Image (tube, rainbow, N blue to C red):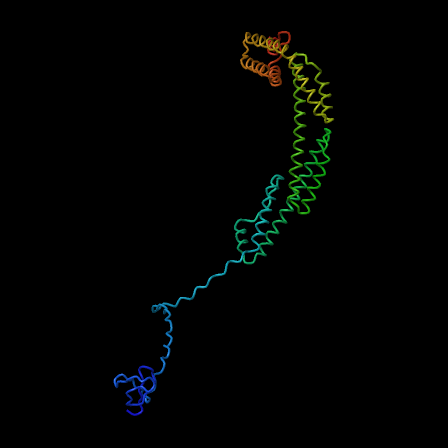
Amino acid sequence: MEGSHSLCPNCGATLAPDVRVCPACQFSLEPTALPRIDESVDPPDEPSPAPAVEEERPKPAPVPRGTAPRAPVRKSAPPVPNPFEAELSRRLARLNQWAEGARALGTDLPRLPAWAEEAARSAPNPEPWAEVVRGIERIAQRRIVTAFEEWDKRTKSRLTRLEAYAVDSRLERDQIEDALHAARTGDIAQALATYHQVDRVVTLKERHLDQAREELERVVALLKDMAVLGVEPPVDPTEVAEDLEAELRAGKLASLKQQIRALRLQAVNRLKSGLPRYIAQYGDYLLEERKHGTATELEAMQLARGAREFFHGRPEEGLRRLRALQQTHGLPAGGRGRAGASREDGA
C-alpha cells in the first residue's frame, strides 16, 4: 500500500516498504512484525474532559391543591424594654414608704390601683401614666405636710408639759422644725425619720415623768390612808406631798424616787405593827354587828382581802380596800359604827 511505512521493532527507525533488514540497527525484519504507519489516517484526538454534572438540589415538596403556600417564618426581634417601668417601680415603692410612715401620723395617702399599675407598665406611651403618678405624689406630699403641721402642734403641747417639770426639750423643738422644713421641700423620707426619732424621745421622757408622778401619788395616798385608818404615818401626808411635788417640778427625778422609796419603807414598817391591831378591832366590830342581826358577810370578806393584800407585799392595795370598807360600813370608833349609831338613832 502506497504511502505506508514500517517501523523497526528494535530501534523504532522508519523503514521503506519491502525492507527485510533495518538499515539502522541491522535487525532482521519479518513481514508480520512490522507495524505500519498509515499517514492517511489522522491521529486520534485527545480525550476531551467530561462535562460537569450539576448537583441536583432537592425539590420542594408539592403543595396540595387548595392550600395556600406557607409564608416564610421570620425571627421576631427581642422586645424592647420599657424605660418607664423601672422609674414606675421606684416611684411606687417610694409612695408605699410614704404611706407606711404617714399612717403613724394619722393620715392615709392615695395610691395607684393595681389595674392602673399594670396598664402603666405595659403602655406603649408611658408619659400620661407618668403624669398620673406625679399627681399622686403631689397629693401625698400635701397631705403629709398637713399631718406634720398638726403633729407639730400636738408635740409642742407635750413639750410644754415636760418643760413645766424642768425637762429639757430644746433639741426636740429644733428637730420638729427640721422635720417640717424637710416635708415642705419634698424630702419626705428625712421628715418621717426625724418624726419617729422625736416621737420616741418625747414618749420616753413622758413615761419617766408619768412613772414618777404615779409613784408620788401612790405614796401620798398610802400615808393618807394610814391616817384615816388610825395608824399614824411617819410624816404628815400634806406636807410631804408639797415637798415631793417641788422635787418633781424641779425635774429631780432621781432624788425624788429615792425619797419615795424611803417613805414607803417607813410607812410599811409602821403598818406591820399598827395594821394588825386595826384589822382585829374591825373584825370584832363586824362580829358585834352580826350579833345584832346585821349581815356582815360581804364586809368580812372585804376585810380579809385587805389584810391579805397587805401581808402579800401590796400595802397600797390593802389599805385601799380597808379604807373603802370603812367608807361604806363605818369606823368602829369607841365600839360604835355607823350601823350601831343608826340603830340607836332609830330606837
Q: Position of residue 295 (x, y in %)?
A: 54, 12
For the question of whether residue 187 can be seen, the reply is yes
Residue at horizontal 64 percent and vertical 7 percent from the top: 334
Q: In which image quadrant can residue 256 be found?
A: top right
For the question of whether residue 341 can be seen, the reply is no
Q: Position of residue 235 (x, y in %)?
A: 71, 15
Q: In which image quadrant can residue 211 be found?
A: top right
Q: In which image quadrant can residue 5 be found?
A: bottom left
Q: Position of residue 199 (x, y in %)?
A: 65, 36
Q: Tell me if residue 296 comes above or below residue 180 in the rendering.
A: above
Identify the image quadrant of the C terminus. Answer: top right
Front residue of 303/110: it is: 110
35 lies left or right of 216: left
Q: Residue furthest bottom?
A: 2
Q: Tell me if residue 7 comes above or below residue 216 in the rendering.
A: below
Q: Tell me if residue 332 comes above or below residue 75 in the rendering.
A: above
Residue at horizontal 53 percent and vertical 55 percent from the top: 122
Front residue of 30/341: it is: 30
77 lies left or right of 338: left
17 lies left or right of 80: left
Identify the image quadrant of the N terminus. Answer: bottom left
Q: Residue furthest front?
A: 26
Q: Tell me if residue 68 comes above or below residue 231 in the rendering.
A: below
